[in-house]
Amino acid sequence: MKSFKTNEIFEIKSQSNFEELALKIFDYQNKNNNFYSEYSSFILKGKKPTSIREIPFLPISFFKTNKIILNNLNHKLIFKSSGTSGARSSHYVADLELYKKSFINNFLQQYHKIEDTCIIGLLPSYEENGDSSLIYMINELISISQNKLSGFYNNNFQELNKSLKILESSKTNTILIGVSYALLDFGKEYPQKLKNTIVIETGGMKGKRKEILKEELHKILKDDFGLNHIHSEYGMTELLSQAYSKKDGVFLSPSWMDILIRDINDPLSILGFNKLGGVNIIDLANLNSCSFIATDDLGIKLNQNEFKINGRLSNSDLRGCNLLIQ
């Protein structure tokens, strides 16, 4: 199996550059992933895609029932979904360095230099389940951060409050990333005005609280923490890349990730901007598994780089990764 130069993925300069590379990766995965090849052959019926709109997108549910990885590759780690609804998706990761490059480069594009930032995780449910790609990512960011207060503060609100006061008084760039219910619980117990801290919610109540609208969640958190905006992270076990929203639920994807919106009544038809439909994701960092995934989320593509998530397709499993109905 011919290898692929991973550096190309993170050196994309334009949309045409992205589309050219996406088509190359489609060919690569179609030749070297028997499961995806069988699926794409069924869809394409002998045709060859000439644009990203014609590439077959693998239904995300297959990650629950099949091992999605290139032929003859050994996995280094298996990431698993939270399993809020029972069945868990598994992502067999062959190259952890590729995952690290993806989330580190994305973080640097979106936020501060990691070494100069205090990274705080408030993700109790993820740690309880284990095998979480999000926990792996935050762990790595914490290890890169040179702030001694960086770390996980799961269920230790008193210590978290103490650390935030120290960080705020020293005007340290701080990122508090947490699952929704834990942020709500902490904000209720320790309301405060944060000036140098960005709060990022990863969505989901994990069965700990009643699901609420995204707008209501953000309003409560903004009031509790004295912030103008709450950020969001959109990611999932099946992807090695994430998108971030800094306000109003508008997500920005990195240069190696793209969103296409499919017609829910005609899944092979791709819609234009500002149309509600199923979310298809191209994640070129998924080089060793499948870069073309049809998710169970509903969304709208606003422009070339920005999109919104508007809930879930009916009858699909509820999971804990930013699935609040908007």
Image (cartoon, grey):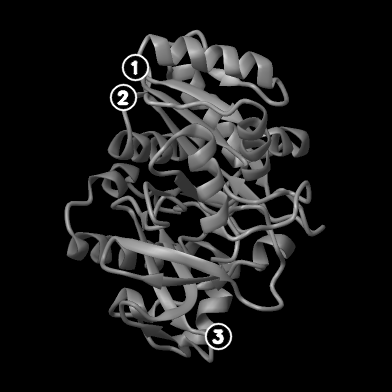
Provide the secondary structure element on which disc 1 rests. helix
The alpha-carbon separation of the residues under discs 1 and 3 comes to 50 Å
Residue linked to disc 1: 116
Q: Nearer the viewer, mark 3 or mark 2?
A: 2
Residue 324 visible in this rendered orientation of the protein: yes
Mark 1 or 3, nearer chain start? 3
Structural crowding at the residue carrying mark 2, measured as other residues with C-alpha within 10 Å and reported as few (<14), some (14–19) or many (≥20): some
- Percent x, y for residue 83? 76, 52
Placement of 122 over or under 43, stated as above or below:
above
Q: Are marks 1 and 2 in contact (CB under 8 Å)?
A: yes
Residue linked to disc 2: 113
The alpha-carbon separation of the residues under discs 1 and 2 comes to 6 Å
> Is 230 positioned to the left or the right of 113 in the image?
right
Mark 3 or 2, nearer chain start? 3
The alpha-carbon separation of the residues under discs 3 and 2 comes to 45 Å
Residue at 21% x, 63% y is: 15
